[in-house]
Image: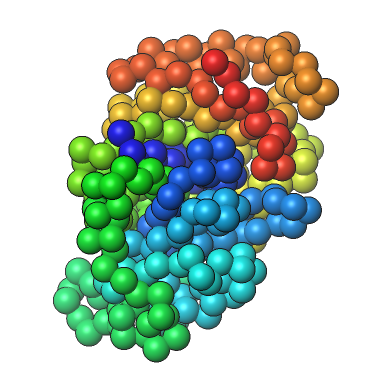
């Protein structure tokens, strides 16, 4: 089936941007769609540059891929314009007329909400406030009403469905992760949307029958940038600092140091079943001992070997995904493909 989907299997920040970019270079998709809000930072190391994208799809790295923002995308226009300039992808950007503009009042009201910023630990972009206005049927600005974005606006569902009819292939890049889903996650310590594969399809304007491979992304440990449960949370300052420095586990939008816990099998099982994951992509394996694959060594030892063995339990969950990709460094091509 023509639409591959990238989803987060844990608490966000699993490396969806990097995996999306890698898959785009490898598969040369015709289209890549990103949905959700700018509270999600997807980081890509490409051509000696670091791209932290809050709105543009990671697939910008493949020059032939058209980049699409769906009706379920929430946009801060200033931020998007910066990313358009950074990626140089203006001529291949397409935006759904019903993508919502997050206005300064949304951001201000979220940031003034002590409970949202404190107890919930919101990133404070105003996504939640914009979603709330949409649910309340309040007056909103959509992409079609934004003069600075008008040139990119096209009927996305029509365009994508016509392209599918002609055999186009697509990558759908979701945001956040299993624990943060407003439907299936750890409410109230969640984001304002569902963050699973079927919802991403709907947010893009695609029906379920086109879903192809569903890549669930995991790290060998779990991070959470805000409050809420973290199983087996690491408290030792020295051990933590390695994650924050070598592992770059600092919020890419919020700048907060991420909390770190052990690999959570219950969350992983849930992520496989709810997303119907067919492939697992593991990132940050280089933070485990025994994962030095940089010199072409393709087998693991020590903690890395042990972790790869525990993944068998995740692969035993229906629909029985297989481990397809293992990322061992930040670079776009620091990826091992497993057969
Ligand atoms: P909000 O969606 O910005 O209001 O944040 C709600 C909760 O989800 C907070 O704990 C955030 O830290 C977390 N969160 C939101 N977006 C992301 C993300 O992209 N990565 C990791 N955590 C996130
Ligand atoms: Mg992130």
As drawn, which residue projects farthest toward the left? 137
In depth, the one of 10 and 58 nearer the eye is 58
**Quadrant holding the C terminus:** top right
User: Within the image, what quadrant is residue 19 found in?
Assistant: top right
Above or below residue 65? Residue 134 is: below
Image position, residue 63 (x, y; %): 57, 55
Image position, residue 121 (x, y; %): 48, 59
**Quadrant holding the N terminus:** top left
Colour mapping used in the image: rainbow
Taking the spot 56% from the left edge, 66% from the top edge, the residue there is 89
In depth, the one of 115 and 173 nearer the eye is 173
Taking the spot 50% from the left edge, 21% from the top edge, the residue there is 323
Number of labels in the image equals 0
Image position, residue 151 (x, y; %): 41, 80
In depth, the one of 71 and 156 nearer the eye is 156
In depth, the one of 275 and 306 nearer the eye is 275
As drawn, which residue projects farthest toward the front? 166
Taking the spot 33% from the left edge, 39% from the top edge, the residue there is 2
Above or below residue 240? Residue 67 is: below
User: Within the image, what quadrant is residue 329 found in?
Assistant: top right
Taking the spot 49% from the left edge, 35% from the top edge, the residue there is 217
Above or below residue 120? Residue 330 is: above
As drawn, which residue projects farthest toward the right? 295
Above or below residue 329? Residue 41 is: below
Residue 332 visible in the snapshot: yes
Residue 194 visible in the snapshot: no
- Using residue 201 as the reference point, say whether residue 59 is left or right of it: right
Image position, residue 5 (x, y; %): 39, 40
């Amino acid at each position: 089936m023509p639409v591959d989907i990238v989803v987060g299997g844990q608490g966000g920040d699993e490396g969806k941007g990097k995996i999306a970019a890698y898959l785009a270079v490898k598969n040369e998709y015709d289209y890549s769609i990103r949905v959700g809000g700018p509270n999600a930072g997807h980081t890509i190391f490409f051509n000696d540059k670091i791209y932290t994208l809050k709105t543009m799809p990671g697939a910008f790295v493949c020059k032939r891929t058209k980049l699409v923002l769906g009706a379920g995308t929430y946009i801060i226009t200033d931020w998007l314009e910066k990313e358009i300039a950074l990626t140089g992808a203006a001529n291949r950007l397409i935006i759904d007329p019903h993508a919502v503009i997050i206005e300064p009042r949304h951001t201000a009201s979220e940031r003034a909400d002590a409970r949202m910023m404190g107890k919930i630990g919101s990133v404070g972009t105003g996504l939640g406030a914009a979603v709330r206005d949409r649910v309340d049927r309040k007056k909103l600005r959509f992409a079609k009403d934004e003069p600075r974005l008008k040139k990119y606006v096209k009927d996305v569902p029509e365009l994508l469905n016509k392209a599918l009819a002609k055999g186009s292939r697509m990558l759908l890049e979701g945001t956040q992760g299993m624990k943060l889903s407003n439907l299936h996650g750890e409410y109230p310590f969640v984001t304002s949307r569902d963050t699973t594969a079927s919802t991403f399809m709907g947010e893009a304007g695609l029906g379920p029958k086109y879903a192809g491979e569903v890549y669930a992304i995991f790290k060998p440990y779990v991070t959470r940038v805000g409050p809420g449960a973290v199983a087996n949370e690491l408290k030792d300052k020295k051990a933590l600092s390695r994650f924050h420095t070598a592992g770059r586990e600092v919020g890419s939008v919020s700048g907060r140091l991420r909390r770190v816990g052990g690999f959570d099998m219950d969350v992983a099982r849930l992520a496989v079943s709810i997303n119907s994951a067919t492939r697992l992509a593991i990132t940050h394996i280089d933070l485990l001992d025994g994962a030095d694959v940089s010199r072409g060594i393709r087998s693991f030892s020590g903690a890395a070997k042990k972790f790869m063995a525990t993944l068998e339990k995740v692969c035993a969950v229906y629909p029985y995904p297989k481990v397809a990709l293992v990322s061992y460094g930040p670079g776009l091509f620091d990826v091992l493909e497993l057969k």
